[in-house]
Amino acid sequence: MDELREQCPWDREQTWESIRHLSIEEVYELSDAIMENDSEEVKKELGDLLLHVVFYAKIGSETNLFNFDDVVNEICEKLIRRHPHIYADVEANDTETVKKNWEQIKLEEGKGEKTLLQGLPKSMPSIVKAFRMQEKVSQVGFDWDDMKDVKGKVLEELEEFETAQTEEERTAEFGDLLFALVNYARHEGINPDDALELTNRKFKNRFEYIEQTAKSNQWELSKMGLEKMDKYWDEAKAKGI
């Protein structure tokens, strides 16, 4: 990276702001590789992501803000602070206790100036943000213990959506319904973002099967009709697509 910043015109011009969107793209590419269970691609994408960490640290070092060692030391110190059951005398024999301690320590680090949900990125995808908010507040006891209550909330929000009158009300109530469904998934031990992405991929593959069938038969896709499309959708499903 030292050589690239000195010798490459493109690398020399980059700033934190200019590579930010590229970093986001790399995280999504890593996510794709993980979802596809492609270990070779995971390895490659981790390298790309590491490059960005080095890049940000290099830019920081050029203005004496921080360097790569500072970045590594910072995360090491944080991990030690937030694992008192390993590095101090706190007891934590299950995952839930570890998570509760983590959130409590995180709040203490903010010296009372930060709220529990303040650290969530504003640009985080909405379904992921809903899941993380629910996880965080559950660590301080704001959660249902009975699945009947969780399911009941979903049904309640569905009824409120169905009886909403204006477009504004329907939008708000649908948001409440989605939030309740995310909570239902969390209580079932399901990551809703993973679940939805699996469905997205399944939908894409099955619809592409319909497209390929239409192409091989020289049919115009828009004139196939829903009944014929459903037939080949079911055929794709039967083939495990």
Image (cartoon, grey):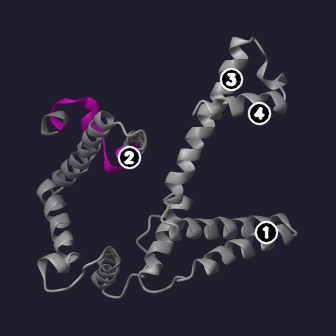
Distance CA(mark 3)–CA(mark 1): 35 Å
**For this rendering, which residue is in front, 228 or 172?**
228
Q: Which mark is residue 211?
A: 3
16 or 127: nearer the eye? 127
Amino acid type of the residue tagged 3 in the rendering: Glu
Q: CA distance from mark 3 to mark 4?
A: 12 Å
Residue 200, quarter of picture = top right
Report the magenta stretch's main SS. helix
Left or right position of 198 against 214: left
| Residue position for label 4 | 230
Tell me the quadrant of the picture where the C terminus can be found.
Answer: top right
Q: Residues within 10 Å of mark 4 (few under 14, many from 20)?
A: few
Q: Amino acid at mark 1?
A: Phe
Q: Which residue is mark 1?
A: 161
Cα gap from disc 2 to disc 3, whole angstroms:
30 Å
Secondary structure state at the residue bearing disc 1? helix
Amino acid type at mark 4: Asp
Residue 36, numbered circle: none
Question: From which residue to which does the magenta span run?
Answer: 5-24
Label 2 with label 3: CB-CB less than 8 Å: no
Q: Amino acid at mark 2?
A: Val
Q: What's the residue at 46%, 73% (across, down)?
A: 135
Farthest residue in the right direction?
165
Q: If you read the primary sequence from the N terminus, does the residue marked by circle 4 or circle 1 appear first?
A: 1
Q: Residue at x 44, y 64 (%)?
A: 121
Callout 2 secondary element:
helix
**Mark earlier in primary sequence (3, 1):** 1
Residue under the point 33% across and 83% down: 104
User: In x, y percent, where is residue 127?
Assistant: 55, 60
Which numbered tag is attached to residue 27? 2
- Tell me which numbered mark, 3 or 4, is placed earlier along the sequence: 3
Q: Is residue 237 above or below residue 167?
A: above
